[in-house]
Image (tube, helix red, strand yellow):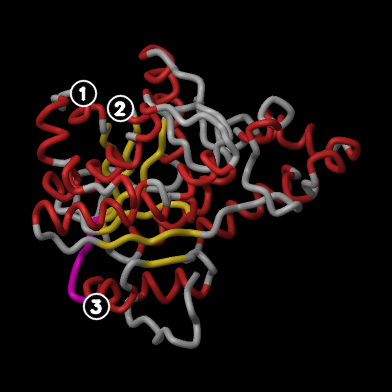
Amino acid sequence: MLDDAAMSTPRSPFLATALERGFIHQCTDMDALDERLCAGRVVAYDGFDCTADSLHVGSLVGIMLLRLFQRCGHKPIVLMGGGTTRIGDPSGKDEARRLLDDAEITRNMAGIRNVFMNFLEFGDGPSDAIMVNNADWLDELRYIPLLRDIGRHFSVNRMLTLDSVRLRLERDQPLSFLEFNYPILQAYDFVELARRFDCELQIGGSDQWGNIVAGVELGRRAEGRTLFGLTMPLITMASGAGWFPSYRRRRVEKVSLFLAAGRACDQASFASSRRKRRRTGITGALFSPACIRARNRRWLKS
């Protein structure tokens, strides 16, 4: 977590505003990133796996951070995880994600695209957002070249310390070799985006810190690039648990997808039930239709 006492006030409008709004949890090198942002336009990305046909409230902070990034004159990339969704991110999960087939991933990707149209300006301009799919390069990887050219930069000792791995092992819960490879592919995504679009910054939730740092280090070791990582605080429930634990997924399914168009009514119907609010520790007023509309208007204007 950022040490406010030791950190100087950023000069770049993006970092200064993001800090003021509480959007920043960790940064790989705040001073160097601030200097780079002041020097000119920067390209940054945030990745979203296609595990559902919309995004839950936990993704909203990342979306608003990308919006702020664009409003400050920089270029955001929305990375669709058409490739990594086939594996499943183990971060914050007690068990492996259900493997989706290609048709489900394609359908989910189409739904997620619609969410971003309400927040970002897409186009061909220098600060216009673009949307790319990591299946475009991950599907073309060959196993032996990947091990030789990329795998040699990763230490198993270090990977075992990642929270997504360590917590599973400490709880004696299975972690498949498939999931163990996820941090490598996420790191490779960062380097590939740097090659294709000169992307220098990866944004993600605080649970992605280890994977983001792996991408920064891979860029430095493999290609001598200077890359940066920035994480946001996770939105949690009243209990402090992340949004949402896997064992509650079915119970709160209507809530966790409220960012999709037309889902606000489902959200409100859930929040109106006092019994369900007590059971999940969620404050109903947070999700009332009036509150959602007011919050969206306030954030979209800011």
Question: Residue beneath label 3, please?
Answer: 35
Which of the 4 image quarters holds residue 82? top left
Q: Label 1 sits on what residue type?
A: Asp
- Using residue 211 as the reference point, say whether residue 228 is left or right of it: left
Return the x and y of residue 198 as percentages of the image width and height. Answer: 14, 53
Mark 2 or mark 1, which has the lower sequence index?
Answer: 2
Return the x and y of residue 268 as percentages of the image width and height. Answer: 76, 37
Regarding mark 1 in the picture, which secondary structure is present there?
Answer: loop
Q: Label 3 sits on what residue type?
A: Glu
Q: Which residues are magenta?
A: 39-43
* Residues at marks 2 and 3 touching, judged by CB atoms closer than 8 Å: no
- Using residue 153 as the reference point, say whether residue 25 is left or right of it: right
Q: Nearer the viewer, residue 160 or 234?
A: 160
Question: Residue beneath label 1, please?
Answer: 139
* Residue at image location 57% in from the left, 38% down from the top: 56
- Residue 113 visible, this angle: no
Regarding mark 3 in the picture, which secondary structure is present there?
Answer: helix
- Residue 150 visible, this angle: yes
* Residues at marks 2 and 1 touching, judged by CB atoms closer than 8 Å: yes
Between tags 3 and 1, which lies in front? 1
* Residue at image location 51% in from the left, 60% down from the top: 301
Return the x and y of residue 62 as percentages of the image width and height. Answer: 46, 52
* Residue at image location 43% in from the left, 59% down from the top: 231
- Using residue 161 as the reference point, say whether residue 169 is left or right of it: right
Residue 286 covered by magenta stretch: no
Query: What is the spatial separation of the Cα atoms under label 2 and label 3, in whole angstroms?
Result: 33 Å
